[in-house]
Amino acid sequence: MRQWKEAVVPNPAREPTFLPLTMAAAGRSDDEAARAVRSRAESADRAAADCWLSLVAGCKAGGQALVSRLHDLSEATSGYAGVKWWLGHGSVHRRRVAAAEHRIDDAVREGDGAEFAEAFIGYDQAVATVVVHVQNRLGKLST
């Protein structure tokens, strides 16, 4: 019987959370590459919260920092997935991650909060899907 590690999902009542699926998925594995994804996700999540507050206030501050953090997370996800898979069988996932990242960037530049929120849902789902796929492929979901 498989046992699942409990993932710590931030409480959205306390602070905005933009990458709950990714952080939960990356928290299921304790290897170095998964920890890198989790660390980059936490950093991107903080940058997203800062950027969100700026968007709500009618500012455009924090956009470049967010774009940089998202790129770092996408790179960590690529490393976790493995270059061969990422460029081969995982290319559909790679394109989804890149498209969602680009959509967030557009929303930030346009100052569109609704688009920003929707784009983050897609990005979180795309990255988390890759992480879970890799864990399934490597048999890392069981303890």
Image (cartoon, rainbow, N blue to C red):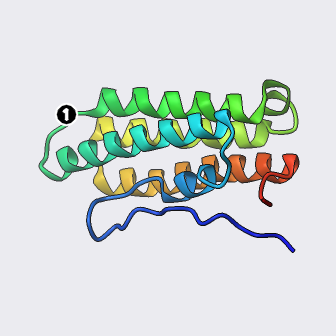
Badge 1 crowding class, 10 Å Cα cut-off, few under 14, some 14 to 19, many 20 or more, is some
Q: How many marks?
A: 1
* Above or below, 68 relative to 100: above
Query: Camera-side residue: 56 or 130?
Result: 130
The residue to which callout 1 is attached is 61
Given the current orientation, which residue lies at the most extreme bottom position?
1
Question: Dividing the picture into quarters, in which one does residue 54 lie?
Answer: top left
Provide residue 118's location: percent of width, then percent of height: 44, 57
139 over 70 or under it: above or below: below
Amino acid marked by disc 1 = Ala
- Toward the viewer: 24 or 16? 24
Classify 93 as above or below 4: above
| Residue placed most toward the observer, 137 or 116 | 137
Report the side of 135 relative to 15 (left or right): right
80 with respect to 68 (left or right)? right
Name the residue rendered at 60%, 27% in the picture. Answer: 75
Residue displayed at 41% across by 26% down: 68
> Residue 83 occupies which quadrant of the picture?
top right
Give the residue displayed 70% in from the left and 36% down from the top.
94
Q: Position of residue 138 (x, y in %)?
A: 86, 46
Residue 124 place in picture, x, y as percent: 54, 52
The C terminus is located in which quarter? bottom right
The N terminus appears in which quarter of the rendering? bottom right
Q: Residue at x 80, y 28 (%)?
A: 87
Disc 1, SS:
loop
